[in-house]
Image: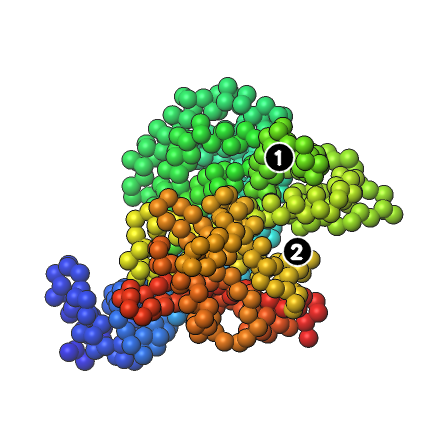
Amino acid sequence: MSNCLADAVLDMARASGGKPFPPTAVADLGGWTRVAAEATALAGTPALPIVSNLIVREANLGGEDVAAAFSAVADAILITDQPAVFAASIEPLLTSAFAVKLAGDTLAAGLELKAAAFLAHPARGPIPDLLSAGALEALTCLVAAGHGSLFGLLAILEKFKKPVVAPMARAVIRSISTAIDISPQAETLLRVVRVVGGIDPVDGGDRVLAEEVESDAAWALAMAALVAALRAPTLTDMDPRLEEAAKYFEVAATTYRRPDARPMFAIILGLRDLLAGILTGDPMDAFGGQSLSADALGGIRDQVRQFCVDSSGLDHWYSNSKTAALRAWASLAADLNELHTQLGKDGFYQTEVVINGLLNVYLSSRTFRVGSRDADIAGVQDLIQPVIECGFASNSSHLCNLAEYTAELASTATTCDDKDLHERLDAARTILKVARGAAKGGETSGKVDGAVRSAPLPPVIGTLVPPGSPDASLIAQMTPATLAAIEERLDHVATARRHLNLVHTELLDILRKKLARSPDYKGDVIPIVDEILVLIINFVASRTNGQSNHYKYLFDPAANENAIHDDLYNFLVGNLGNRAEYEVSHIGGGRVDIRLTFDGFALHIEMKVDATRVPMEDRTAYLKQAATYQGNDIRIGFLVALRHKAFDPTGPPPHIKTLISHTEFEIEGDPVSRHMVLVAVPGSRTAPSQSR
């Protein structure tokens, strides 16, 4: 072994003959302890990028010194003053979620200083300028991944008051674009993009410097307008932001002849025409125009194909993600005939079709990674999706569900004289009319006089009806039972359709891996069991998030089994229809609380109310009863309990990963164990405002 780690690394590189290093390369170099002890001495050497790649590749094979090794390599990168070595060394860390977790905070602190150094000495020379630009871009990636300070990053970006050298100007523009992804408030920094890109002249500004990044500035402004359109609270608010995006994409496509901007401009024009049709009540008419003609859509696909052929060798701004983005736009254009059916409704009802289609295109258009290369889209989606969902998309599924429910009531009412049903139908029609107008951003009847205060509406209905308007007052006068019935239907259906977040997805994966040990978890059983798992996760999530006025039994110490039984049954009926059966007799010699029937098999849910602190996996009597119902069916079931004393009633509910778990239950004389998903729903809760 060489006396110097750098020499040992270079010797191994020469011996490899250009082939991948052996999988035990770190151990062959002396192990993680040696890397931790000597990595700092690699600063600025050709060995540093090699070691950076090696530790990322072999991180899962390391021991106790892995964290120290990553810290030492991070320190070496931060004191490296050669731009090429710096970039090649930090890149592997930024693309590894594990590395970012270990060294992210250390890197962010050092990178902030390196980036800010440009402002203190703006005329240092090409090499330090490149270092500061690279540091700013790396810092932005880390901030987007949750390391370092967003406010610190914004403070640096805000200090750019005039055009600067091209490498830093591009870094500033891209960082601002990503900052807007992270926080809508960062839109105020678009003035910096305009100044650095020469769009807004400033005293002492160097026009020659600005000209080098004008194209980048136009692209960033277009993308900012696009995400602002997606975040708009109503369709009316969305329209001017799409117009703004179209303006900048047109400039980028025509003035700067950017091949990536041409299809973006074309598809934005199509979306604008669709939106105009929706707002005027004639969305289908938009498909008769030039922007959505077969020739136009085919032209978009041709432009994308040509760009993909011509884009080799382009710089960072034309990265692989740009090609992916344009392919996504081309795919959207190809699917537009199907998509316009959904867009042609009174609002963007089908979030799954419309929002995800637009969002995926937008996400693919971003220049920056977030966290790791393997999780680009998921990472950015975690940042942007909640912001978009608090705009018009948050109401879109509710509006869709309300429209479907109204149609269902109308169909039933033709053959039924039930007074309550007809009252619900009239109420649903009224709410739907008001909600459709609000979704379009249209005029309501005006504000109620300040002296008049209407009763609060149920939460979901309240999101669809503008608060403080005569419409809200009118709807509040409907009978509580009618409003409650409509609210319950909307809440149940929307909850089941909600996409799982990152935590819920991880929980689903954990449960699926454990169920995979069951010989019955195979074939057609898998997707159905998975669907029920998603429903159960969403049920628990919505109930632990729910307020006391909506799920009263969860805050009632005297609530019995019937309360949660009825709640879960109604929730499942709202999503599975008559597949959910209530208290079915002659199952395993008894009566099962809820039976879910499917082709060829059934799933059984045993319900309990529990006033002990005993872990559910130790409640043998409960498990025996639940397992009994599996005697003549697949050996997978659910045990759901309302637990009054298992958790602190005055504190927050436990994390959902502790509330839903899995266990295997052995049956004497049966070589195959029964698999049970255990679900604990906290009861006897205290409203946060009353916690002590």
Q: Position of residue 674 (x, y in %)?
A: 35, 63
Query: Is 256 rendered above or below residue 41?
Result: above
Counting residues from the start of the chain, the first of labels 2 and 1 encountered is 1
> Residue 551: in sight, yes or no?
yes
The secondary structure type at the circle numbered 1 is helix
236, above or below 66, in the image:
above
Q: Residue furthest top?
A: 288
Q: Looking at the picture, does residue 10 appear above or below residue 527? A: below
As measured in the structure, the alpha-carbon distance from the residue carrying label 2 to the one carrying label 1 is 23 Å
Most extreme residue toward the right, as rendered?
Answer: 451
Residue 409 is labelled as 1
Mark 2 crowdedness (10 Å alpha carbons): few <14, some 14-19, many ≥20:
some
Display colour scheme:
rainbow
From the image, tell me which residue sits under label 2: 550
Badge 1 local density, few (<14 within 10 Å), some, or many (20+)?
many
Residue 671: percent from left, percent from top: 27, 66
